[in-house]
Image (cartoon, rainbow, N blue to C red):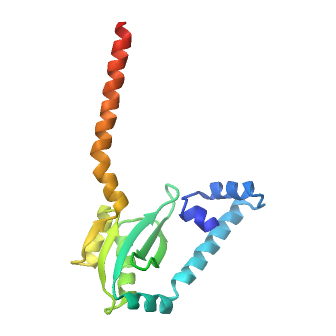
Amino acid sequence: MIGALRYSEHRSVPEIHAVLLDREVEVSERNVTHLLHRYEELLALRLTDATRLREKLRAQGQVILALDGLQPDVGHEVLWVLRDVLSGEVLLARALLGGGEAELTPLIQEVKEALGEGLPIIGVISDGQHAIRHTIAQVLPGVPHQLCQFHYLREAARPVFEADRHAKVQLKRELLSMSGSS
């Protein structure tokens, strides 16, 4: 539950602590932090079951890599998750202090090397941050890279959102000027 609250719902340690107290689980914030570290260790063990993972991926013959950074709290480490879109398997998850090319390059290289020559990465999906784009171009030259659907649709809708916001501001001004003149 602690892992799900942290990484699925992006809750902070104090928020997780409050949820547990609401469920009548007597635990300190410090113990929540300790349990969160235990969760991350268990997750790492699960992800390092290389034999199971390699067999599953070899059966599909290729990998489409999804790359995303999750930062539950500003100023805290970013949990970088690299997963295969086709199988849904997490290939690598690691908490890092940043998300620049220097931090991302070793992660992508590690996944690439773990997959080996016989299992090609045929595409990459991400939120399109500049550091991710540059890293993908450097580590996986020639591999197609695109925005995930959520980010693509959000960017496509941005002009409509801005036009709507501008129209609301104009409407409020007109209503205020009309009510002031009556």
Q: Residue at x 34, y 35 (%)?
A: 165
Q: Nearer the viewer, residue 12 or 177?
A: 177
Q: Residue at x 78, y 58 (%)?
A: 24
Looking at the image, residue 148 sits to the left or right of residue 44; the answer is: left
Q: Residue at x 39, y 75 (%)?
A: 85
Query: Would you place residue 111 above or below residue 180 in this image?
Result: below
* Residue 141, horizontal then vertical, whole percent: 23, 78
Q: Nearer the viewer, residue 70 or 55?
A: 55
Q: Which image quarter holds the N terminus?
A: bottom right
* Residue 123, horizontal then vertical, whole percent: 29, 76
Q: Which image quarter holds the C terminus?
A: top left
Residue 180: image quadrant is top left
Looking at the image, residue 91 sits to the left or right of residue 32; the answer is: left
The extreme top residue here reads 182
Q: Residue at x 28, y 78 (%)?
A: 139
Query: Would you place residue 46 above or below residue 132 in this image?
Result: below
* Residue 29, horizontal then vertical, whole percent: 69, 59
Looking at the image, residue 142 sits to the left or right of residue 64; the answer is: left
Query: Would you place residue 73 above or below residue 36 in this image?
Result: above
Query: Would you place residue 132 above or below residue 90 in this image?
Result: above
Looking at the image, residue 94 sits to the left or right of residue 28; the answer is: left
* Residue 99, horizontal then vertical, whole percent: 39, 65
